[in-house]
Amino acid sequence: MSSLTGKTALVTGSTSGIGRAVAEVLAERGAHVIVSGRDADRGARTVEALRAAGGAADFAPADLAAPGGPGSLARAALAITGQVDILVNNAGIFPFLPVADTTEEVFDSIYAVNVKAPFFLVAELAPKMAERGGGAIVNISTVVSRQAAKDVVAYASSKAALNNLTQSWTAEYAPSGIRVNTVSPGAIATEGTRDMLAVTGEDFAKTVPSRRIGTPGDIAAAVAFLVSDDADYVHGAYIAVDGGIGAF
Ligand SMILES: NC(=O)c1ccc[n+]([C@@H]2O[C@H](COP(=O)([O-])OP(=O)(O)OC[C@H]3O[C@@H](n4cnc5c(N)ncnc54)[C@H](OP(=O)(O)O)[C@@H]3O)[C@@H](O)[C@H]2O)c1
Protein backbone atom coordinates (compact mmCIF):
# COMPACT_ATOMS: atom_id res chain seq x y z
CA MET A 1 0.00 0.00 0.00
CA SER A 2 1.32 3.48 -0.81
CA SER A 3 3.04 5.42 1.97
CA LEU A 4 1.50 8.22 4.01
CA THR A 5 4.87 9.83 4.73
CA GLY A 6 4.60 13.62 4.74
CA LYS A 7 0.88 13.56 5.54
CA THR A 8 -0.76 14.67 8.78
CA ALA A 9 -3.84 12.72 9.90
CA LEU A 10 -6.35 13.86 12.51
CA VAL A 11 -8.25 10.89 13.93
CA THR A 12 -11.09 11.86 16.27
CA GLY A 13 -11.89 9.49 19.12
CA SER A 14 -8.49 7.84 18.85
CA THR A 15 -8.00 7.38 22.61
CA SER A 16 -9.96 4.11 22.35
CA GLY A 17 -11.19 1.27 20.18
CA ILE A 18 -11.52 1.73 16.43
CA GLY A 19 -9.97 5.21 16.42
CA ARG A 20 -6.87 4.02 18.25
CA ALA A 21 -6.42 1.15 15.76
CA VAL A 22 -6.80 3.61 12.88
CA ALA A 23 -4.19 5.89 14.50
CA GLU A 24 -1.79 2.94 14.83
CA VAL A 25 -2.10 1.86 11.20
CA LEU A 26 -1.82 5.39 9.79
CA ALA A 27 1.29 6.03 11.93
CA GLU A 28 2.79 2.71 10.75
CA ARG A 29 2.23 3.87 7.16
CA GLY A 30 4.20 7.08 7.88
CA ALA A 31 1.54 9.68 8.70
CA HIS A 32 2.03 12.14 11.55
CA VAL A 33 -1.06 11.28 13.58
CA ILE A 34 -2.96 13.70 15.78
CA VAL A 35 -4.69 11.65 18.43
CA SER A 36 -7.81 13.20 19.94
CA GLY A 37 -10.43 12.61 22.61
CA ARG A 38 -11.44 14.03 25.98
CA ASP A 39 -9.36 11.72 28.16
CA ALA A 40 -5.82 13.12 28.47
CA ASP A 41 -4.43 9.98 30.15
CA ARG A 42 -5.66 7.66 27.42
CA GLY A 43 -4.46 10.22 24.86
CA ALA A 44 -0.96 10.29 26.37
CA ARG A 45 -0.82 6.47 26.48
CA THR A 46 -1.89 6.24 22.83
CA VAL A 47 0.70 8.80 21.70
CA GLU A 48 3.39 7.03 23.73
CA ALA A 49 2.51 3.68 22.08
CA LEU A 50 2.57 5.17 18.57
CA ARG A 51 5.94 6.82 19.19
CA ALA A 52 7.35 3.64 20.79
CA ALA A 53 6.45 1.82 17.56
CA GLY A 54 8.46 4.40 15.58
CA GLY A 55 5.58 6.64 14.54
CA ALA A 56 5.03 10.40 14.83
CA ALA A 57 2.10 11.43 17.00
CA ASP A 58 0.73 14.23 19.18
CA PHE A 59 -2.36 14.59 21.35
CA ALA A 60 -4.94 17.32 20.79
CA PRO A 61 -7.64 17.14 23.48
CA ALA A 62 -11.21 17.96 22.49
CA ASP A 63 -14.75 17.69 23.75
CA LEU A 64 -16.60 17.48 20.47
CA ALA A 65 -19.97 17.90 22.17
CA ALA A 66 -19.00 21.29 23.58
CA PRO A 67 -19.99 24.47 21.73
CA GLY A 68 -17.02 25.47 19.57
CA GLY A 69 -15.23 22.19 20.34
CA PRO A 70 -14.84 20.99 16.73
CA GLY A 71 -13.51 24.36 15.49
CA SER A 72 -11.00 24.55 18.35
CA LEU A 73 -9.79 21.02 17.59
CA ALA A 74 -9.36 21.84 13.89
CA ARG A 75 -7.26 24.91 14.72
CA ALA A 76 -5.20 23.02 17.34
CA ALA A 77 -4.55 20.22 14.84
CA LEU A 78 -3.48 22.66 12.11
CA ALA A 79 -1.06 24.28 14.56
CA ILE A 80 0.84 21.02 15.16
CA THR A 81 2.39 20.43 11.72
CA GLY A 82 0.80 23.31 9.79
CA GLN A 83 -1.49 21.03 7.78
CA VAL A 84 -4.15 18.33 8.02
CA ASP A 85 -4.25 16.10 4.93
CA ILE A 86 -6.38 13.29 6.36
CA LEU A 87 -9.40 13.55 8.64
CA VAL A 88 -11.04 10.46 10.11
CA ASN A 89 -14.38 11.34 11.73
CA ASN A 90 -14.46 8.39 14.10
CA ALA A 91 -15.51 9.79 17.51
CA GLY A 92 -19.01 8.63 18.22
CA ILE A 93 -21.44 7.84 21.00
CA PHE A 94 -24.01 5.08 20.75
CA PRO A 95 -26.35 4.86 23.75
CA PHE A 96 -28.76 1.94 23.52
CA LEU A 97 -32.17 3.37 24.45
CA PRO A 98 -35.75 2.91 23.33
CA VAL A 99 -37.19 6.04 21.71
CA ALA A 100 -39.37 6.93 24.70
CA ASP A 101 -36.33 6.86 27.03
CA THR A 102 -34.19 9.07 24.79
CA THR A 103 -34.15 12.47 26.47
CA GLU A 104 -33.63 15.67 24.53
CA GLU A 105 -30.23 16.00 26.22
CA VAL A 106 -29.12 12.54 25.08
CA PHE A 107 -30.45 13.16 21.57
CA ASP A 108 -28.56 16.47 21.35
CA SER A 109 -25.30 14.88 22.55
CA ILE A 110 -25.61 12.06 19.96
CA TYR A 111 -26.13 14.55 17.15
CA ALA A 112 -23.42 16.89 18.50
CA VAL A 113 -20.68 14.24 18.46
CA ASN A 114 -21.82 12.12 15.50
CA VAL A 115 -23.03 14.81 13.06
CA LYS A 116 -22.29 18.37 14.15
CA ALA A 117 -18.63 17.72 15.02
CA PRO A 118 -17.78 16.11 11.64
CA PHE A 119 -19.66 18.94 9.89
CA PHE A 120 -17.68 21.73 11.55
CA LEU A 121 -14.34 19.88 11.41
CA VAL A 122 -14.81 19.60 7.66
CA ALA A 123 -15.95 23.23 7.42
CA GLU A 124 -12.62 24.29 8.99
CA LEU A 125 -10.29 21.73 7.41
CA ALA A 126 -11.56 21.08 3.88
CA PRO A 127 -10.81 24.61 2.58
CA LYS A 128 -7.21 24.20 3.86
CA MET A 129 -6.97 20.79 2.16
CA ALA A 130 -8.26 22.36 -1.04
CA GLU A 131 -5.60 25.10 -0.88
CA ARG A 132 -2.96 22.33 -0.70
CA GLY A 133 -4.43 20.49 -3.69
CA GLY A 134 -6.46 17.82 -1.91
CA GLY A 135 -6.99 15.54 1.03
CA ALA A 136 -8.89 12.51 2.27
CA ILE A 137 -11.78 12.30 4.72
CA VAL A 138 -13.28 9.09 6.09
CA ASN A 139 -16.51 9.02 8.08
CA ILE A 140 -17.07 6.07 10.40
CA SER A 141 -20.73 5.08 10.17
CA THR A 142 -22.50 1.90 11.28
CA VAL A 143 -24.44 -0.97 9.75
CA VAL A 144 -27.64 0.30 11.43
CA SER A 145 -27.43 3.57 9.45
CA ARG A 146 -29.03 1.62 6.58
CA GLN A 147 -31.18 -0.86 8.49
CA ALA A 148 -34.23 -0.76 10.70
CA ALA A 149 -32.99 -1.24 14.26
CA LYS A 150 -34.89 -0.65 17.46
CA ASP A 151 -33.34 0.75 20.66
CA VAL A 152 -30.68 2.71 18.74
CA VAL A 153 -32.97 4.95 16.71
CA ALA A 154 -31.37 8.32 17.51
CA TYR A 155 -27.90 6.84 16.92
CA ALA A 156 -28.85 5.08 13.67
CA SER A 157 -30.44 8.25 12.29
CA SER A 158 -27.37 10.33 13.22
CA LYS A 159 -25.14 7.97 11.24
CA ALA A 160 -27.59 8.07 8.31
CA ALA A 161 -27.03 11.84 8.35
CA LEU A 162 -23.28 11.20 8.34
CA ASN A 163 -23.70 8.92 5.29
CA ASN A 164 -25.37 11.81 3.51
CA LEU A 165 -22.49 14.11 4.46
CA THR A 166 -20.11 11.71 2.68
CA GLN A 167 -22.17 12.10 -0.50
CA SER A 168 -22.80 15.83 -0.18
CA TRP A 169 -19.16 16.60 0.67
CA THR A 170 -18.15 14.57 -2.38
CA ALA A 171 -20.31 16.86 -4.53
CA GLU A 172 -18.82 19.94 -2.86
CA TYR A 173 -15.16 18.97 -2.51
CA ALA A 174 -14.23 16.33 -5.11
CA PRO A 175 -13.49 19.08 -7.66
CA SER A 176 -10.87 20.39 -5.18
CA GLY A 177 -9.16 16.99 -4.96
CA ILE A 178 -10.69 15.99 -1.63
CA ARG A 179 -11.94 12.40 -1.43
CA VAL A 180 -14.67 11.64 1.11
CA ASN A 181 -15.72 8.08 1.90
CA THR A 182 -17.58 6.08 4.53
CA VAL A 183 -16.46 2.95 6.36
CA SER A 184 -19.40 1.24 8.02
CA PRO A 185 -18.56 -1.21 10.81
CA GLY A 186 -20.71 -4.06 12.05
CA ALA A 187 -20.18 -5.37 15.60
CA ILE A 188 -16.59 -4.63 16.61
CA ALA A 189 -14.98 -5.51 19.95
CA THR A 190 -13.88 -2.23 21.57
CA GLU A 191 -13.94 -0.57 24.99
CA GLY A 192 -17.25 0.99 23.91
CA THR A 193 -18.94 -2.36 23.19
CA ARG A 194 -17.14 -4.49 25.82
CA ASP A 195 -20.02 -4.69 28.31
CA MET A 196 -22.62 -5.40 25.65
CA LEU A 197 -20.56 -8.04 23.86
CA ALA A 198 -19.67 -9.71 27.17
CA VAL A 199 -23.38 -10.53 27.49
CA THR A 200 -24.50 -11.03 23.88
CA GLY A 201 -21.26 -11.48 21.90
CA GLU A 202 -21.20 -15.26 21.48
CA ASP A 203 -24.84 -15.48 20.40
CA PHE A 204 -24.48 -12.46 18.17
CA ALA A 205 -21.41 -13.90 16.43
CA LYS A 206 -23.52 -16.88 15.33
CA THR A 207 -25.82 -14.47 13.44
CA VAL A 208 -22.95 -12.86 11.53
CA PRO A 209 -22.43 -14.51 8.12
CA SER A 210 -18.65 -14.62 8.73
CA ARG A 211 -19.34 -16.09 12.21
CA ARG A 212 -17.15 -13.71 14.19
CA ILE A 213 -17.20 -10.32 15.90
CA GLY A 214 -14.91 -7.84 14.13
CA THR A 215 -11.71 -6.29 15.44
CA PRO A 216 -10.71 -2.61 15.38
CA GLY A 217 -7.95 -3.68 12.98
CA ASP A 218 -10.58 -4.83 10.45
CA ILE A 219 -11.87 -1.25 10.29
CA ALA A 220 -8.42 0.36 10.37
CA ALA A 221 -7.33 -1.63 7.29
CA ALA A 222 -10.24 -0.25 5.25
CA VAL A 223 -9.57 3.31 6.43
CA ALA A 224 -5.86 2.97 5.59
CA PHE A 225 -6.77 1.97 2.03
CA LEU A 226 -9.25 4.82 1.59
CA VAL A 227 -6.84 7.54 2.73
CA SER A 228 -3.98 6.21 0.58
CA ASP A 229 -3.19 7.11 -3.02
CA ASP A 230 -4.27 3.56 -3.92
CA ALA A 231 -7.84 4.85 -3.53
CA ASP A 232 -7.21 7.88 -5.73
CA TYR A 233 -10.41 7.40 -7.79
CA VAL A 234 -12.61 6.32 -4.84
CA HIS A 235 -15.05 9.11 -3.98
CA GLY A 236 -18.32 8.96 -2.02
CA ALA A 237 -18.11 5.20 -1.37
CA TYR A 238 -19.84 3.33 1.44
CA ILE A 239 -17.64 0.39 2.40
CA ALA A 240 -19.28 -2.06 4.79
CA VAL A 241 -16.81 -3.86 7.06
CA ASP A 242 -19.29 -5.94 8.97
CA GLY A 243 -18.74 -9.66 8.34
CA GLY A 244 -21.77 -9.58 6.04
CA ILE A 245 -24.53 -8.52 8.46
CA GLY A 246 -25.36 -5.48 6.33
CA ALA A 247 -25.80 -7.58 3.21
CA PHE A 248 -29.40 -8.55 4.02
N1 LIG B 1 -17.67 -0.85 18.13
C1 LIG B 1 -18.67 -1.12 17.29
O1 LIG B 1 -19.26 -2.23 17.27
C2 LIG B 1 -19.11 -0.08 16.28
C3 LIG B 1 -20.03 -0.47 15.29
C4 LIG B 1 -20.45 0.46 14.35
C5 LIG B 1 -19.96 1.75 14.39
N2 LIG B 1 -19.07 2.11 15.36
C6 LIG B 1 -18.59 3.51 15.36
O2 LIG B 1 -17.19 3.51 15.46
C7 LIG B 1 -16.76 4.67 16.19
C8 LIG B 1 -15.83 4.24 17.32
O3 LIG B 1 -16.49 3.31 18.14
P1 LIG B 1 -15.72 2.49 19.28
O4 LIG B 1 -16.47 1.24 19.49
O5 LIG B 1 -14.27 2.45 18.99
O6 LIG B 1 -16.03 3.46 20.54
P2 LIG B 1 -15.26 3.68 21.92
O7 LIG B 1 -14.33 2.58 22.23
O8 LIG B 1 -16.34 4.02 22.89
O9 LIG B 1 -14.43 5.01 21.59
C9 LIG B 1 -15.10 6.21 21.31
C10 LIG B 1 -14.09 7.31 21.10
O10 LIG B 1 -14.81 8.53 20.86
C11 LIG B 1 -14.32 9.53 21.74
N3 LIG B 1 -15.39 10.44 22.15
C12 LIG B 1 -16.60 10.12 22.66
N4 LIG B 1 -17.27 11.24 22.99
C13 LIG B 1 -16.46 12.28 22.68
C14 LIG B 1 -16.57 13.69 22.80
N5 LIG B 1 -17.66 14.29 23.33
N6 LIG B 1 -15.54 14.46 22.40
C15 LIG B 1 -14.42 13.89 21.88
N7 LIG B 1 -14.25 12.57 21.75
C16 LIG B 1 -15.26 11.77 22.15
C17 LIG B 1 -13.76 8.76 22.94
O11 LIG B 1 -12.70 9.51 23.52
P3 LIG B 1 -12.69 10.06 25.05
O12 LIG B 1 -13.43 9.05 25.90
O13 LIG B 1 -11.24 10.21 25.35
O14 LIG B 1 -13.40 11.34 24.93
C18 LIG B 1 -13.18 7.50 22.29
O15 LIG B 1 -11.86 7.73 21.85
C19 LIG B 1 -18.02 5.37 16.66
O16 LIG B 1 -18.34 6.42 15.77
C20 LIG B 1 -19.09 4.29 16.57
O17 LIG B 1 -20.38 4.82 16.35
C21 LIG B 1 -18.64 1.23 16.30
Image (cartoon, rainbow, N blue to C red):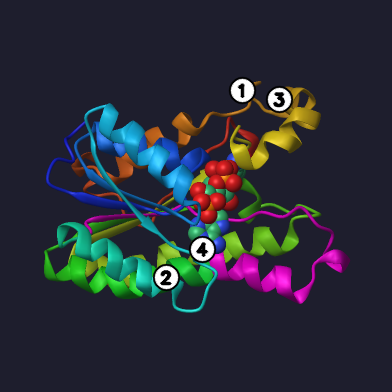
Q: Is mark 2 within 8 Å of ligand 1?
A: no
Q: Residue, x 66% and y 50% (percent of image)?
A: 144
Q: Foreground residue, 226 or 62?
A: 62
Asked if the residues shown at circle 4 and circle 2 are in contact, with their CB atoms under 8 angstroms apart, the answer is: no
* Quarter of the rendering containing residue 196: top right
Q: Nearer the viewer, mark 2 or mark 3?
A: 2
The answer to whether marks 2 and 3 mark residues whose Cβ atoms lie closer than 8 Å is: no
**Quadrant of the image occupied by residue 211:** top right
Label 2, secondary structure: give it: helix
Residue at the (49%, 66%) spot, across then down? 64
Q: For the residues marked 4 and 1, what is the alpha-carbon distance in whole angstroms?
A: 26 Å
Relative to residue 195, is residue 183 drawn left or right?
Answer: left
In this figure, which residue is indicated by the disc labeled 1?
210
Q: Position of residue 163 (x, y in %)?
A: 50, 60
Magenta-tinted stretch:
84-113
- Locate residue 241, reporting x and y percent: 51, 37
Answer with left or right where residue 142 lies relative to residue 31: right
Q: Nearer the viewer, mark 4 or mark 2?
A: 2
Q: Which residue is disc 2 drawn over?
A: 70
Kind of residue at disc 1:
Ser
Determine whether label 3 and label 1 are within 8 Å by CB: no
Which-is-in-front pick, marks 3 and 1?
3
Instruction: Find the distance from the CA under tag 4 to the CA under tag 3.
Output: 26 Å
Q: Is mark 1 within 8 Å of ligand 1?
A: no
Q: Earlier in the sequence, mark 4 or mark 2?
A: 2
User: Label 4 vs label 2: CA separation?
Assistant: 15 Å
Whichever of labels 3 and 1 marks the residue nearer the N terminus, that label is 3
Is residue 213 located in the magenta-colored stretch of the structure? Answer: no
Whether residue 239 can be seen here = no
Residue at x 49%, y 57% (from the top left corner): 38
- Packing grade of label 1 (10 A; few <14, some 14-19, many >=20) is few
Say which element carries label 1.
loop
